């Protein structure tokens, strides 16, 4: 009988085998005659790069790698908690349900308070120091692609539109070596000299972060920007990030740009997703930054200091939300993350099935990241209580709320239908529901206004149903966490190529002569030009942590 091997690892051990056997065969002297020195060197180094891409983080920081799986103490805690929950339900089901309802009510009040505070927090973007073209640093741009031939031409046009000197761009299209269709499309595009196609040899785990780690070995820029296949970044995004790094202190390692969807108005699902993203990137993240908590990075539109990214081990190839994990790992090394204003537009999933698959991967990755960084919670509490608090608020509460949204909505409806339920209890439940809805409504309205999105009454009315969709995704995420922890559910792209209904966009790709609504609508005071102004708070413990190297 099959059983999960999750007491020490989260998945099949076959995934942990080194990928050296899958590396390219080195060229013979006769083959080297037809290669450039760069191509020959890359082929010579590919086996080493591939092995590092999959296993370097585990070798350097095993306690911060998802490959290590659960510790013995975590496994005992999970088993004890599960046994207690099952025993409590068996012995006193009514009391168990009342306790669960009380826990959910407390969670609602905490989340509502945090969201109201976030809505009242003005966004603080990183200060900038204007730089002439000659002073701009070289920026490596990494885009991991797999089966993206349909959307690749649009991506290339968006990258060509970047307002940055071409000779200071090092754009790498990172494509799996066996993805012949995408490779053929890339070679047929007539790419300029700033573009380079990086073929990733096959190897396990087959994930986006492993491909990015492989390309990281070849990045030559002082800064490194990360994008996804469907992205349409604002033309000024990289330039403003470079100017922000010029004005930043030594603790700033990463800048995150806000994300939203260019097909926001395609259907009701994409509208809800657009409002959720606006609330997250333009309301919650500025609040986290103000509180001094680490930012869970989005999977795209991150601009890093390349040397710092290499110092902390790059991306975790065994974590399916490598972005959120990297934001936490940067904080544990004593670094902070700032925000830049120019946004990136993406393609939102247009079908519930695609949305559920993507959301389940995110929730699974959040749970993975929590387990990784809570391996020694007492030690983390002593060293940096703000980081532990931020970890619980930014990752723990979203996982819990995703699990409870559906049951809470059903429970509230059933309780109000029951004729024998006391009115005092109904009033209490109604008050909690209104408190939770008010907190969520506040960040939705605030985020939509900051992003320049049109807000309809029907959107606000349908939001509770949209939130309830997270529960099936969360259940699937927990199942996959046990049985398929490193399975990467890829989101299909290219269904909305002709749709550009976000304010300030133009089909099919953005133009350098136009501006997205966010950058044009933000007050000028949110983009200060004074150099030396700190972004966020860096606690003394984080500075000490950086000096210790972890």
Image (cartoon, rainbow, N blue to C red):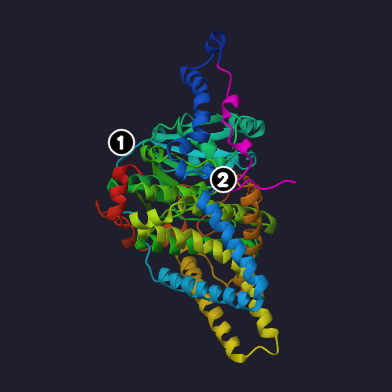
In this view, the residue farthest toward the right is 1
- The reply to whether the magenta stretch includes residue 324 is no
- The reply to whether the magenta stretch includes residue 20 is yes
The one nearer the camera, 71 or 346, is 71
**Which residue is depicted at the point 33% across and 39% down?**
136
**Which residue is depicted at the point 49% across and 17% down?**
36
Which contiguous range is marked in magenta? 1-26
Q: Is residue 284 above or below residue 485?
A: below
**Which residue is depicted at the point 52% across and 21% down?**
43
Where residue 373 sits: x, y (%)? 46, 51
Kindly report which numbered mark, 1 or 2, lies closer to the viewer in this rendering: 2
Q: Can residue 465 be seen in this view?
A: no
- Is 334 displayed left or right of 37 in the figure? left
Where residue 75 sits: x, y (%)? 55, 52
Element at badge 1?
helix
In primary-sequence order, the first of circles 1 and 2 is 2
- Is 404 displayed left or right of 303 in the figure? right
For the C terminus, the image quarter is: top left
Q: Which residue position holds label 1?
A: 134
Q: Which residue position holds label 2?
A: 8
**Which residue is depicted at the point 57% across and 50% down?**
507
Q: Can residue 549 be seen in this view?
A: yes
């Amino acid at each position: 009988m099959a059983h999960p091997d999750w007491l020490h690892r989260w998945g099949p051990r076959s995934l942990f085998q080194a990928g050296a056997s899958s590396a390219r065969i080195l060229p013979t002297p006769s083959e080297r005659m037809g290669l450039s020195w760069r191509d020959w060197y890359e082929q010579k180094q590919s086996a080493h790069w591939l092995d590092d891409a999959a296993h370097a983080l585990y070798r350097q920081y095993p306690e911060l790698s998802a490959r290590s799986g659960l510790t013995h103490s975590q496994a005992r805690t999970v088993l004890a908690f599960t046994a207690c929950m099952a025993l409590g339900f068996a012995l006193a089901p009514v009391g168990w349900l009342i306790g669960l309802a009380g826990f959910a009510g407390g969670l609602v009040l905490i989340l509502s308070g945090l969201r109201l505070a976030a809505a009242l927090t003005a966004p603080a973007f990183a200060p900038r120091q204007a730089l002439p073209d000659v002073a701009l640093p070289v920026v490596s741009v990494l885009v991991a692609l797999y089966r993206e031939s349909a959307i690749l031409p649009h991506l290339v046009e968006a990258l060509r539109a970047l307002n940055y000197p071409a000779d200071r761009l090092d754009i790498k299209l990172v494509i799996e070596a066996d993805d012949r269709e995408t490779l053929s499309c890339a070679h047929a595009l007539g790419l300029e000299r700033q573009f380079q196609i990086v073929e990733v040899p096959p190897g396990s785990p087959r994930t986006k972060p492993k491909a990015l780690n492989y390309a990281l070995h070849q990045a030559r820029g002082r800064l490194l920007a990360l994008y996804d296949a469907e992205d349409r970044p604002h033309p000024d995004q990289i330039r403003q990030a470079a100017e922000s790094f010029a004005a930043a202190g030594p603790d700033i390692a990463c800048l995150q740009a806000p994300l939203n969807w260019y097909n926001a108005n395609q259907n009701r699902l994409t509208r809800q997703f657009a409002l959720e993203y606006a609330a997250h990137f333009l309301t919650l993240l500025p609040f986290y930054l103000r509180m001094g908590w680490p930012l869970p990075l989005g999977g795209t539109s991150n601009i890093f200091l390349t040397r710092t990214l290499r110092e902390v081990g790059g991306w975790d190839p065994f974590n399916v939300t490598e972005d959120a994990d990297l934001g936490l790992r940067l904080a544990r090394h004593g670094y902070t993350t700032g925000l830049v204003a120019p946004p990136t537009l993406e393609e939102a999933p247009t079908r519930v099935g695609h949305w559920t698959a993507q959301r389940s991967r995110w929730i699974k990755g959040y749970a993975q990241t929590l387990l990784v960084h809570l391996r020694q919670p007492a030690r983390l509490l002593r060293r940096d209580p703000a980081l532990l608090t931020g970890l619980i608020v930014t990752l723990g509460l979203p996982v819990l709320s995703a699990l409870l949204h559906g049951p809470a909505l059903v429970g509230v409806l059933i309780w109000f239908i029951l004729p024998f339920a006391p009115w005092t209890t109904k009033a209490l439940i109604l008050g909690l529901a209104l408190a939770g809805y008010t907190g969520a409504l506040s960040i939705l309205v605030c985020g939509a206004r900051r992003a320049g999105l049109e807000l309809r009454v029907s959107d606000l009315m349908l939001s509770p149903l949209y939130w309830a969709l997270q529960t099936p995704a969360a259940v699937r995420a927990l199942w996959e966490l046990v049985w398929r922890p490193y399975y990467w559910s890829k989101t299909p792209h290219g269904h909305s190529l002709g749709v550009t209904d976000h304010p300030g966009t133009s089909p099919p790709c953005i133009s350098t002569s136009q501006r997205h609504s966010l950058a044009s609508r933000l007050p000028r005071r949110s983009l200060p030009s004074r150099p030396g102004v700190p972004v966020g708070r860096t606690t003394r413990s984080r500075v000490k942590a950086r000096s210790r190297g972890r």
